[in-house]
Structure formats: structure tokens, C-alpha cells
Amino acid sequence: MTHATGKYTDFEGLRERAVALRRAGLSRRQIRDRLHVDNNDILNRLLEGEPAPAWTKRPNAKDDLRERARELRLQGWTYDQIQVELGCSKSSISLWVRDLPKPERKRTREEASLIAKRGWETTLRLREEERQRTRRQAMQEVSELSDRELFLLGVGLYWAEGAKSKPYSRRERVTFVNSDPDMITVFLAWLRLLRVDSSSLRFAVQIHETADVAGAEAFWAAHVGIDTKDLLKTTLKRHNPRTNRKNTAETYNGCLRVDVRNGADLYRRIEGWWYGIVGAATATGSSNRT
């Protein structure tokens, strides 16, 4: 049989030396360095059939876990129980115990389903607690809001959610529509900061016709502090039986539209403020930002 050329030409002689070194108790690394064999395939062939000396066999860190997992499986423990007890992955447990008989089912399917449901409910509760904790921490980071911060926030809020004039349809008016009561609250606070006269504000509800229209009108009127009779005519969205509406809960109150009468001048200033923000944000350098 021919082997690699060059320094491995005398393969049989090299193998005799490698086997002798192996039987003398040398490790693969020691043999490789002693014989100057830097090709692992060649080294494997040189040592084929020769067991490693006992001193080179390091104990597997998972041997104890494996034995314990097998003991628990024989006692009837499930994968989930073993995972919790030993802190190892299910994939490892499966490899270790797959030759063992499955434990006899001790619960009915209904009982197991109930236990799983309780576990999921606990998971959801913990997730919600974490969400609320993060929310509270974030709220504390805001602290107080300066007039300038509210001013800039309001400009961005309007430009994202408010009506805007289009080149093909010049309508310079201030109209803000939203279904989130908090967004309406912040928008009205911004208008007060701009010294917009409250008497120039008009409010109208926009809602699906199959919803509780009267309830929504009462909700929004109370939210902005007016009587329901002071609302403009409600806009009803026609029902399409082919659509699957998601906003059918009791908390659904449609949207509130806020109009500022004679707001053309204010609209032009909002537009200017917005593009001023854009220019400042894209200007070279960031000395005015933290």
C-alpha cells in the first residue's frame, strides 16, 4: 500500500516507532512532537488500534450528571423534573436515558393539562410583573418635563399623527385624531403651552357604527371636560360584515378628533417648527445634543 510521499514515505517504519511510543505511555501530542508528524490523518493511521494510556483519559464532567439522570429516570421522573433537579438540558437528558423504559404515566391527560395550564399562567404572571416593573422604572427616568421638552414633543406628535397639507390639496388646518386618551391629553397640554384659546377647540367622535356610540361620546366628553352636547356630530364608520373586527371590547371608544378653529397660522408654524427640528437633527456636529 502506498502512503503519503515525502517524510511519511517509510510509513511502516514510522508506525512501528509510533506504536512503541504509545505503548510506552506517551500521549498523541507527545508522539506527534517526537516524530514531527503534523498531519492528524497520518497520526490517526499510525496509532490505529492502539488504545490511549490510562493517564490521558480525563474524567467527563458530565459523567456524574449522567448517572444521576439515569437513577432519577428509573425512579419514574420526567424529563422536566430531571432538568429542574440537575440543571442540564433536555437534549442531554434524552441522550443519557433514551435506552431506559418510559416511566408509567401517573396522571391523567386532564390532570397533566391542568398542571401545564397552571405553569403557563404562572409564566404569564411573572412576565406581566416584569413588564410593569420595567414600565415603572422607565416612567421614573422621565421625571419632570420642561416647557421646551413639551414643545418639541408636541411638534413631533402632531407631525406624526395630525392632519398635514399636501401639495395637491392645500388645507392648512390643525386637526388631530387619536384613539389613545393619553395622546389626546398630551396634545391638549401642548396646545395650552402654545396659548391656544380653549374656545377655539372643537371635538368630534369617530367610531364604528356597531359600537356603543353614546357610551363613547360620554367617555370622550368627560375626558376633555366638556358636555356631550358640545361635541360636533359623530362620524360613524360603516360596518363591513366581511371584515373581522378586533376592536370590539367594552374599552373601545373609537377616536376623538380635535380641531383648532382658524388654525392656518398655527399650522404654518407647526410645519416650520418640524422642519427646524429636522434641520437641527441632521446638522453637522452634535454639540446641541447629549
Image: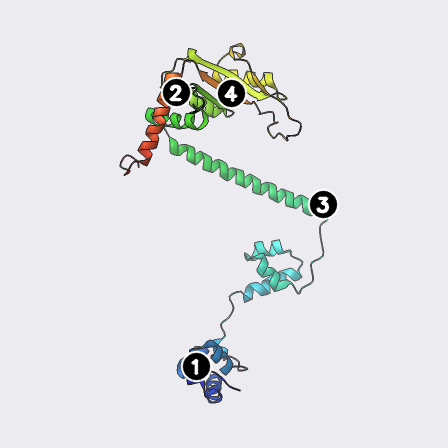
Asked if marks 1 and 2 touch (Cβ < 8 Å), the reply is no
Instruction: Decide which of 139, 114 is in the foreground and name it.
Output: 139
User: Relative to 115, is 182 on the left or the right?
Assistant: left
Distance from disc 1 to disc 4, alpha carbons, whole Å, reads 83 Å
- Looking at the rendered structure, the secondary structure element under dot 2 is helix
Q: Is residue 44 above or below residue 224?
A: below
Mark seen at residue 267: 2
Circle 2 packing at 10 Å, graded few (<14), some (14-19), many (20+), is many
Distance from disc 2 to disc 4, alpha carbons, whole Å, reads 19 Å
Q: Earlier in the sequence, mark 1 or mark 2?
A: 1
**Which residue is denoted by mark 3 in the rendering?**
110
**Which residue is denoted by mark 1 in the rendering?**
31
Distance from disc 3 to disc 4, alpha carbons, whole Å, reads 48 Å
Quadrant location of the C terminus?
A: top left
Query: Residue 192 appears at what percent x and percent y?
Result: 38, 18
Circle 1 packing at 10 Å, graded few (<14), some (14-19), many (20+), is many
Q: Residue shown at 44%/77% (left/top)? A: 39
Distance from disc 1 to disc 2, alpha carbons, whole Å, reads 84 Å
Does the rendering let one see residue 145? no
Asked if marks 1 and 4 touch (Cβ < 8 Å), the reply is no
Q: Amino acid at mark 2?
A: Tyr
Q: Nearer the viewer, mark 1 or mark 3?
A: 1
Q: How many numbered tags mark residues here?
A: 4
Q: Earlier in the sequence, mark 3 or mark 4?
A: 3
Q: Amino acid at mark 1?
A: Ile
Q: Residue shown at 39%/21% (left/top)? A: 190
Query: Residue 43 appears at what percent x and percent y?
Result: 47, 80
Circle 3 packing at 10 Å, graded few (<14), some (14-19), many (20+), is few
Distance from disc 3 to disc 2, alpha carbons, whole Å, reads 63 Å
Distance from disc 1 to disc 3, alpha carbons, whole Å, reads 62 Å
Instruction: Decide which of 156, 71 is in the foreground and name it.
Output: 156
